[in-house]
Amino acid sequence: MTSTDVLLKFYPEFHCRYNGEDFNVEFTFRRIPIRRSHQAVSLAVQHLTSNVLFPNQVDLKEPQVKVDEIAYSVKPDETQTTFKSQDIRNQKPSYSENRKTLCYFNNLLNDRQKTAVRKILLGQCRPTPYIIFGPPGTGKTITVVEAILQIYTHIPSSRIVVCTPSNSAADLIMERLHLSNVLEPTQIVRLNSHQRSLENIPESILKYCQFGDDLDMISRYRVIVSTCIMAGGMYGLGIRSGHFTHIFVDESGQATEPECLTPIGLIAGNLNGQIVLAGDPKQLGPIIMSPYAKMYGLELSLLERLMNRDVYQRDEDSAEEHEGFDPNLVTMLIYNYRSHPGILDLPSRLFYYSQLQPLADPALTHRLSQWKELPKSGFPVIFHGLRGLDLRETNSPSWFNPGEIMQVIIYLQGVLKENIKPEDIGVITPYKKQVEKIRFMIDNLGLPEIKVGSVEEFQGQEQQVIILSCVRSNEKLIGADIRHSLGFLCNPKRLNVSITRAISLLIIVGNPYVLVQDHHWNQLIQYCKDNGGYIESTQTKNE
């Protein structure tokens, strides 16, 4: 796509038959997701109560499971010093000394994760949604998987629907449930769309997969894993109220509210139904292209909207307990298993109330702490000030910055000399033309293939090394960027995602005189200066 043209690619057979005649081109899209979203909103208005959609207070119910029947054999402080992976693979479930009740399937859960699992198992806030607030790298999905296994084990009458906005996220949960060796294949199903290719499904979960051919049979499984929209296919089955007892929506911050309401509607009318939302309202929400949809609030996820309600709000006066949240409604995960402390400290202060605590393996996080290119040894964060030029080509509305491209390449070459694998490096930049130019330079110089993309492409991922190219250098155009939500400015969530992907090294290349106008960027630049990670601004000219 250029500023004036849309270019199309056709299959080879078309070119063999094409004789130069004019064609009309019509762009269409699948209506099913939109129709199911409309259906979910309509049913929500009719059947979901205010304490699900607009909760104002917590009315605690009797626990689903008596707490004295659950024995917790691992003390919280025993897990806070471990640097092992939290993967459930090959772990044995732990038993209490009296062997009355099965405990955690994942022995490496930390105290906050255990609290979340326990609160979900008790289910006292139902049907008001319970929220797992999971900042980057804190093991949110692992917590969801443990909660599912505990409900399945301790509540024999439970029927659980587990949803995510994307197939990849649903596959991840399915794989981890499979690795637990707790669920029989006859008790769990991965529900897929008819259009999904088998080639895109992990081999380990193929035996669990169904493609909507017999939804009535699928609805009888005790655990159903699908995307949010695919779960809407079960609306037409005439399922009785109370059939499904628990709804989990992982990565709920990335789903639109109607999308999230699609699986939630499956427990409409069931006053004992339990809803669990897991996600991070401080990161990027659903991707909405329509300015009208944004204007009317579709960009605000159900997770974030609920977190903005008084009953879910953080109480500064009780911040020492449960990070200030009501533990009956929210558990905030605070132990980070991803990043070097120097990388983690700033986003913790800017976005997470200074609560995040580093708990990752130093063998990974400190791998580049002594890199010779660091302005200060031991502090693996660099802000490289560069007053370059932001340019546009005549046929493209997107921006690029030649000076920043060259500086990014220099850093890439330096990092690759440290035996960092290419797949462990990521370059993030907000403009498509900058992505294109950096990829071209990487290919032209014979460098190995490295992932270069937008912030949205990196959400949910982690890399050993992250390099940010901010592009914009013209102070006069900042107002236009802010009005159109371009670049990194005026969008704290985009900044948050960008700086929380790195494990051992974070490099930012940008114009400090432009970025400093934003409060959060000003904090980042000052943080780098205070810790010796700031490189003085240089200026490039093209005259």
Image (tube, helix red, strand yellow):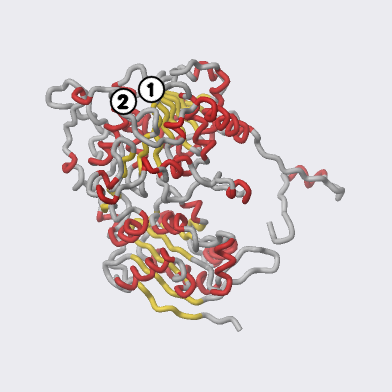
Front position in the image: 188 or 410: 188
| Residue 308 image position (x, y, % from top left) | 42, 45
The residue to which callout 2 is attached is 61
Q: Which quadrant holds residue 106?
A: top left
Residue 207 in sight from this viewpoint: no
Residue at x 39%, y 59% (from the top left corner): 465
Kindly check if marks 1 and 2 are in contact, taking CB atoms under 8 A apart as contact.
Answer: yes
Element type at mark 1? loop
| Residue 43 image position (x, y, % from top left) | 55, 27
Q: CA distance from mark 1 to mark 2?
A: 9 Å
Residue at x 29%, y 52% (from the top left corner): 356
Q: Which quadrant holds residue 157?
A: top left
Front position in the image: 309 or 304: 309
In the image, what residue type sits under mark 2? Lys
Label 2 CA crowd tier, 10 Å (few <14, some 14–19, many 20+): few
| Residue 3 image position (x, y, % from top left) | 70, 61
Which sits earlier in the primary sequence, circle 1 or circle 2? 2
Residue at x 65%, y 34% (from the top left corner): 31
The residue to which callout 1 is attached is 272
Residue 393 in sight from this viewpoint: yes
Front label number (1 vs 2): 2
In the image, what residue type sits under mark 1? Asn
Front position in the image: 413 or 255: 255
